[in-house]
Image (cartoon, rainbow, N blue to C red):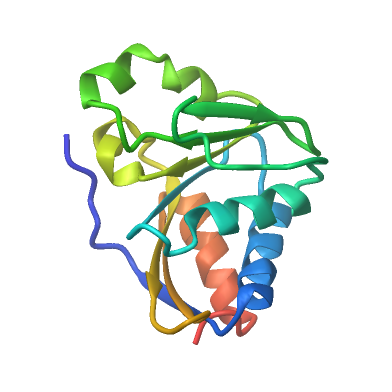
Amino acid sequence: MEKDHNGEQYVYISHHLEDTDKLAAWLAEASLPGTVIGLDGDLGAGKTAFSQRFATHLGVKGIVNSPTFTIIKEYVGRLPLYHMDVYRLSIDEAGELGLDEYFYGEGVCLVEWSQMINELLPESHLHLYLETTGLEERKITVRGFGEPYEELCRNLNKNGVFK
């Protein structure tokens, strides 16, 4: 089943890593058990950098790096953090990993290359698409799917986060 991607989208411009850090902080603060955030964009667009900043604001201590070959890395913070990189997985392989236990568990899931497993993502999730627009500048398109995430986006927009 294909997800409906016609929802409201918001644009966040990050002029440098400190701006990305601010967005990561707002989203980490708003995260609850079962939060799922999909991260997509070209190689080098900043998915892992965003994940590192998000983890820091979730209270994760230590180094957070890309789970490219391990697929899922687990961290302890205010909530458990499940950092996933599903780029190398087929949809069948991803389906065999038991991702639902992570998606509907007590932690927060950050899923790099989420478009690769779009049909396995929960109906309700947040999606960020990162694009390189300059040496340090990024355009981050944010979409909330499902009411809690749509409301989060509306609130961030109302507070002037999005341009």
Q: Residue at x 57, y 41 (%)?
A: 35
Q: Please tell me in which quadrant of the rendered image residue 91 appears.
A: top left
Q: Please tell me in which quadrant of the rendered image residue 61 appears.
A: top right
Q: Please tell me in which quadrant of the rendered image residue 21 appears.
A: bottom right
Number of marks present in the image shown: 0
Image: 163 above or below 51: below
The furthest residue to the left: 1
Q: Residue at x 61, y 85 (%)?
A: 160
The residue nearer to you, when weighing 159 against 17, is 17
Q: Residue at x 28, y 45 (%)?
A: 115
In x, y percent, where is residue 156? 59, 72
Q: Residue at x 39, y 82 (%)?
A: 133
The residue nearer to you, when weighing 126 against 84, is 84
For this view, does 7 lie left or right of residue 68? left
Image: 154 above or below 105: below
The residue nearer to you, when weighing 62 against 153, is 62
The residue nearer to you, when weighing 94 against 102, is 94
Image: 154 above or below 126: below
**Quarter of the N terminus within the rendering:** top left
In x, y percent, where is residue 83? 56, 36
Image: 91 above or below 136: above
In x, y percent, where is residue 113? 36, 45
